[in-house]
Amino acid sequence: MDTALASLEVSDLACVRGSRALFRNLYFKVEAGGALIVEGPNGSGKTSLLRMLAGFLSPAAGTISIRVGPSEIAEGEDRGKHIGWFGHQDGLKTQLTATENLSFFARLYGSDPDIGATLEWAGLSRAAGYPVQYLSAGQKKRLALARLKVSGRRIWLLDEPFAALDASGKKLVEQMLGDHCASAGIAIAATHETMSIPASILALNGAPR
Amino acid sequence: MSALLFRDVRLAFRAGGGATLALAFFAGVAALVPLGIGSDLKLLARIAGGVLWISAALAALLSLDRLFQSDFEDGSLDLIALAPQSLEAASLAKIAAHWLTTGLPLTALSPLLGLLFGLPPGSYSALVLSLLIGTPAVSAIGAVGASLTLSIRRGGLILPLVVLPLLSPAVIFGAGAVIAALDGLSNGALGLLAAFSLVSVILAPFACAAGVRLNLAG
């Protein structure tokens, strides 16, 4: 885990999907410990922005840079090593149990968490031994949250983290993001709902053509 | 990267995994051919290598189309792409897992199917050795096709069209090695097969990683 992470900065970013420009001239900077909430109507480019930050999509114009101390990392695959991803797809294997899913991911990311305690934190202790296909949509989201928590990454990108979650699940997300920012992490979340954590707001309004 | 390898092997044997299906398909096709040809043992022995090799390649293709596609559809591929290891290493792990759950069991089953073709005792080692050396190339080349077609719905139908022509060297050398053993000759087919397999396994992960990147950006 790189504790020296300083900031994520985006300058003059533009996104074109197909022949349609979703946004352009986007500038923002999130310092360590900061949270950014991306708002906007459906199709305004929230998911595309997150996928760009993660390095899956290449920007039509502009740069994304992650500063780690004095050195700068801007290259796609290198940037990925700082990113914790929470997509709108769960990324879970339905044939494997909750425990197996989480411990596979921890091994893949080279982190060594207490699997049982993490599942208990996510409220999944009783579901731990069941194949994920028997879990509800909300429980799958909770498992994905647990996975993000053990990723050990400093920059969290969350796409609709509240989807399918109940009231206590939403509290869990807010508490988790608050803790992450308090320990000098960065969280960027795309959501339609209000989030009760101190955060800057980026509104994508779908203006450019 | 062993985490991904173990997970894929485990998934292949869980419900809905392709390992046993591929094995059953291989056995089924190879067992049907002697029934269709009749009891001409001399003819059967001569075509055994070719038939078993074609059946093995087709059986492997059955489970190949899901190699990257299932991870793409449920979002796992995004997480794998952000893992500390490169996508090239991840692709190699997936190729290895596919071979361990398909190519290796097919190889182990092949002597039994050779019996159905009345293969003489001296040619079993050539059959097993050619499959052992050649099936990694099937997994590797198939994985390249799988990475290119991973975002296409019904990509499993396009995959054989992309991959089968590329597999022809493996089938030619593999079946050739069995024929040579039948005739008591040495034609160097196994050596060529090994070279082909080695090059495929070395180059395929790079092509797979490029294919995956292309599709993640789509």
Image (cartoon, coloured by chain):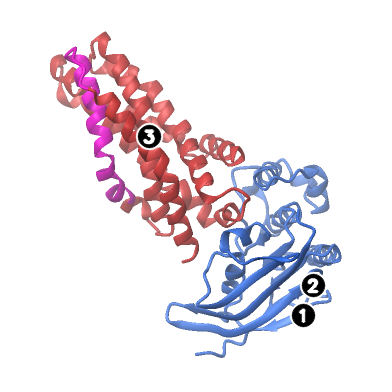
Q: Is residue B168 magenta?
A: yes
Q: Quadrant of residue B43?
A: top left
Q: Which residue is mark 2?
A: A34
Do tag 2 and tag 1 residues touch (Cβ < 8 Å)? yes
Q: Is residue A96 magenta?
A: no
How many discs mark residues in the rendered view? 3
> In the rendering, which numbered label is found on residue B198?
3
Residue at the spot 56% in from the left edge and 38% down from the top edge: B5
Query: Looking at the colours in the rendered structure, which chain would you say is drawn in red?
Result: B
Query: Looking at the colours in the rendered structure, which chain would you say is drawn in blue?
Result: A
Q: Secondary structure at mark 1?
A: strand
Tell me, yes or no, if residue A29 can be seen here. Answer: yes
Q: Which residue is mark 1?
A: A200
Closer to the eye: label 3 or 1: 3
Q: Position of residue A169 (x, y in %)?
A: 78, 63
Amino acid carrying label 2: it is Gly
Q: Residues within 10 Å of mark 1 (few under 14, many from 20)?
A: few
